[in-house]
Image: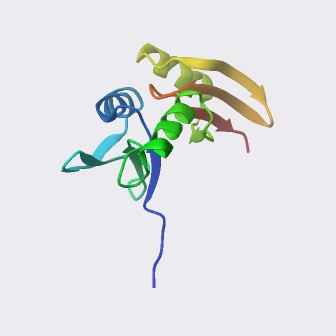
């Protein structure tokens, strides 16, 4: 039996805004975009990892009750969720490229912990750590 993780979900405030950010700015590609009433299953893939999907989901019913959905939206907006990690070959070059595409960084590239890293957030507030690992 083969098992693998196929989708990791990320809560976003607005799926269209998130889709624009992840596709136009970060270079992901749309994988699935399916609607069922007011629920939308939206996933994107990074071209270098075609077997892994990032789900861009709105915290809402039926997955969460109304109060929990509101709390999750607030937590995401505050940047309280754990960061996602984007591994790059050259952090400073990736930083420069993403800035020209309009990605707003909250930390410029810094050399530490045996590598170089920088931090940015998506439009919903989700934190990303971009890391250049040294061998």
- Residue 2 in view here: yes
Q: Quadrant of the C terminus?
A: top right
Q: Residue lying farthest right?
A: 113
Q: Is residue 45 above or below residue 123?
A: below
Q: Residue at x 74, y 34 (%)?
A: 115
Q: Position of residue 66 (x, y in %)?
A: 42, 44
For the point 53% across and 38% down, which residue is it? 71
Nearer the observer, 87 or 14: 14
Identify the residue at the far front of this view.
67
Q: Residue furthest bottom?
A: 1
Tag count: 0
Q: Is residue 131 above or below residue 109?
A: below
Residue at image location 70% in from the left, 30% down from the top = 116
Which of the 4 image quadrants contains residue 120? top right
Measured along the vertical axis of the image, is residue 2 above or below residue 76? below
Q: Is residue 7 left or right of residue 118?
A: left
Percent position of residue 90, x then y = 60, 30
**Eyeballing the image, is 40 above or below 125?**
below
Query: Split into 4 quadrants, where in the image is the N terminus?
Result: bottom left
Which coloring applies here? rainbow
Q: Nearer the viewer, residue 77 or 107?
A: 77
The residue lying at 43 percent from left, 51 percent from top is: 64
Q: Position of residue 50 (x, y in %)?
A: 38, 54
Residue 70: x and y in percent read 47, 37
Q: Is residue 47 visible?
A: no
């Amino acid at each position: 039996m083969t098992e693998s993780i196929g989708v990791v979900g990320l809560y976003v405030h607005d799926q269209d805004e998130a889709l624009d950010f992840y596709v136009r700015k970060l270079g992901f590609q749309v994988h699935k975009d399916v609607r069922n009433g007011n629920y939308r299953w939206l996933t994107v893939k990074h071209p270098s990892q075609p077997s892994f999907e990032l789900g861009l989901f709105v915290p809402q019913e039926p997955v969460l009750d109304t109060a929990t959905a509101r709390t999750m939206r607030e937590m995401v907006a505050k940047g309280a969720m754990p960061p996602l990690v984007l591994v790059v070959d050259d952090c400073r070059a990736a930083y420069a490229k993403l800035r020209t595409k309009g990605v707003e960084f909250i930390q410029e590239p810094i050399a530490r912990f045996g590598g170089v890293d920088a931090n940015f957030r998506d439009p919903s507030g989700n934190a990303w750590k971009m890391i250049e690992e040294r061998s």
